Protein backbone atom coordinates (compact mmCIF):
# COMPACT_ATOMS: atom_id res chain seq x y z
CA UNK A 1 0.00 0.00 0.00
CA UNK A 2 1.32 3.46 -0.77
CA UNK A 3 2.15 6.09 1.84
CA UNK A 4 -0.78 8.35 2.71
CA UNK A 5 0.02 11.77 4.16
CA UNK A 6 -3.67 12.49 4.92
CA UNK A 7 -3.52 9.76 7.52
CA UNK A 8 0.05 9.74 8.70
CA UNK A 9 1.10 6.25 7.64
CA UNK A 10 4.06 5.12 5.68
CA UNK A 11 4.27 2.84 2.69
CA UNK A 12 3.72 -0.89 3.11
CA UNK A 13 5.74 -2.48 0.29
CA UNK A 14 4.64 -5.69 -1.41
CA UNK A 15 7.83 -7.73 -1.54
CA UNK A 16 7.99 -10.47 -4.14
CA UNK A 17 8.56 -14.01 -3.03
CA UNK A 18 7.22 -13.40 0.47
CA UNK A 19 4.45 -15.71 1.63
CA UNK A 20 2.05 -14.37 4.21
CA UNK A 21 -0.68 -16.29 6.04
CA UNK A 22 -4.33 -15.32 5.64
CA UNK A 23 -5.29 -13.48 8.80
CA UNK A 24 -7.70 -10.73 9.85
CA UNK A 25 -5.96 -7.59 8.63
CA UNK A 26 -8.15 -4.96 10.27
CA UNK A 27 -5.21 -2.77 11.18
CA UNK A 28 -3.82 -2.88 7.66
CA UNK A 29 -7.02 -2.72 5.61
CA UNK A 30 -8.80 -0.16 7.78
CA UNK A 31 -5.85 2.04 8.50
CA UNK A 32 -7.80 5.22 7.69
CA UNK A 33 -10.61 4.38 10.14
CA UNK A 34 -10.85 6.97 12.89
CA UNK A 35 -10.40 5.79 16.43
CA UNK A 36 -11.28 9.08 18.15
CA UNK A 37 -15.02 8.86 17.35
CA UNK A 38 -17.32 8.02 20.31
CA UNK A 39 -19.04 4.63 20.19
CA UNK A 40 -22.44 6.31 20.61
CA UNK A 41 -21.99 8.02 17.24
CA UNK A 42 -21.29 4.70 15.51
CA UNK A 43 -24.29 3.06 17.17
CA UNK A 44 -26.55 6.00 16.27
CA UNK A 45 -25.43 5.85 12.65
CA UNK A 46 -25.98 2.11 12.37
CA UNK A 47 -29.35 2.44 14.12
CA UNK A 48 -30.40 5.11 11.64
CA UNK A 49 -29.38 2.92 8.71
CA UNK A 50 -31.32 0.00 10.20
CA UNK A 51 -34.42 2.21 10.63
CA UNK A 52 -34.20 3.28 6.98
CA UNK A 53 -33.86 -0.37 5.97
CA UNK A 54 -36.97 -1.28 8.00
CA UNK A 55 -38.95 1.57 6.40
CA UNK A 56 -37.96 0.45 2.91
CA UNK A 57 -38.71 -3.18 3.73
CA UNK A 58 -42.11 -2.20 5.13
CA UNK A 59 -42.92 -0.12 2.06
CA UNK A 60 -42.00 -2.98 -0.25
CA UNK A 61 -44.11 -5.37 1.83
CA UNK A 62 -47.08 -3.01 1.64
CA UNK A 63 -46.67 -2.74 -2.13
CA UNK A 64 -46.54 -6.51 -2.57
CA UNK A 65 -49.56 -7.02 -0.33
CA UNK A 66 -51.54 -4.39 -2.20
CA UNK A 67 -50.58 -5.84 -5.58
CA UNK A 68 -51.59 -9.34 -4.49
CA UNK A 69 -54.94 -8.28 -2.98
CA UNK A 70 -58.09 -8.91 -5.02
CA UNK A 71 -59.40 -5.95 -7.00
CA UNK A 72 -61.97 -4.10 -4.89
CA UNK A 73 -63.86 -2.83 -7.93
CA UNK A 74 -64.22 -6.26 -9.49
CA UNK A 75 -67.64 -7.80 -9.96
CA UNK A 76 -68.38 -10.35 -7.24
CA UNK A 77 -69.01 -13.97 -8.17
CA UNK A 78 -72.63 -14.87 -8.84
CA UNK A 79 -73.42 -11.97 -11.17
CA UNK A 80 -74.45 -9.42 -8.53
CA UNK A 81 -73.48 -5.79 -8.92
CA UNK A 82 -71.53 -3.70 -6.43
CA UNK A 83 -73.71 -1.43 -4.30
CA UNK A 84 -74.72 1.84 -5.92
CA UNK A 85 -74.46 0.78 -9.59
CA UNK A 86 -77.27 0.02 -12.01
CA UNK A 87 -76.28 -2.08 -15.00
CA UNK A 88 -78.06 -2.78 -18.25
CA UNK A 89 -77.62 -6.22 -19.77
CA UNK A 90 -77.37 -6.93 -23.50
CA UNK A 91 -81.08 -7.85 -23.71
CA UNK A 92 -82.16 -4.49 -22.22
CA UNK A 93 -82.84 -5.76 -18.69
CA UNK A 94 -81.60 -3.58 -15.85
CA UNK A 95 -80.44 -4.63 -12.41
CA UNK A 96 -80.49 -2.58 -9.23
CA UNK A 97 -77.73 -2.91 -6.64
CA UNK A 98 -77.67 -6.41 -5.17
CA UNK A 99 -79.85 -7.96 -7.90
CA UNK A 100 -78.67 -10.63 -10.29
CA UNK A 101 -78.71 -10.03 -14.04
CA UNK A 102 -80.51 -12.78 -15.87
CA UNK A 103 -79.81 -13.11 -19.52
Image: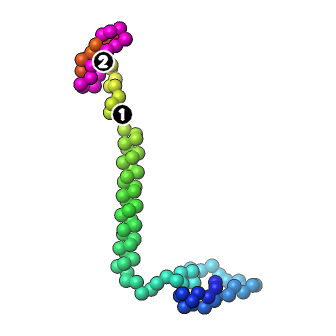
**x%, y% of residue 70?**
36, 34
**Judging from the image, what secondary structure is the residue with disc 2 in?**
strand
Q: Which residue bears the numbered disc 1? A: 71
Q: Is residue 92 magenta?
A: yes
Residue 98 visible somewhere in the drawing: no
**From which residue to which does the magenta span run?**
80-93
Q: Which of marks 1 and 2 is in front?
A: 2
Q: Which residue bears the numbered disc 2? A: 87
The answer to which quarter of the image holds residue 102 is: top left
Residue that extends furthest to the right in the rendered view of this protein: 17
**x%, y% of residue 67?**
40, 41
Q: Residue at x 32, y 25 (%)?
A: 76
Query: Within 10 Å of the Cα at label 1, are there few (<14), some (14-19), or many (20+) other Cα atoms?
Result: few
Residue 75 visible somewhere in the drawing: yes
**Judging from the image, what secondary structure is the residue with disc 1 in?**
loop
**x%, y% of residue 58?**
36, 54
Amino acid sequence: LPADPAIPVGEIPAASGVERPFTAELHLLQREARTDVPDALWHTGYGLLFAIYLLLFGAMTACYLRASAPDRGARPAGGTQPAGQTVTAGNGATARPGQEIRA
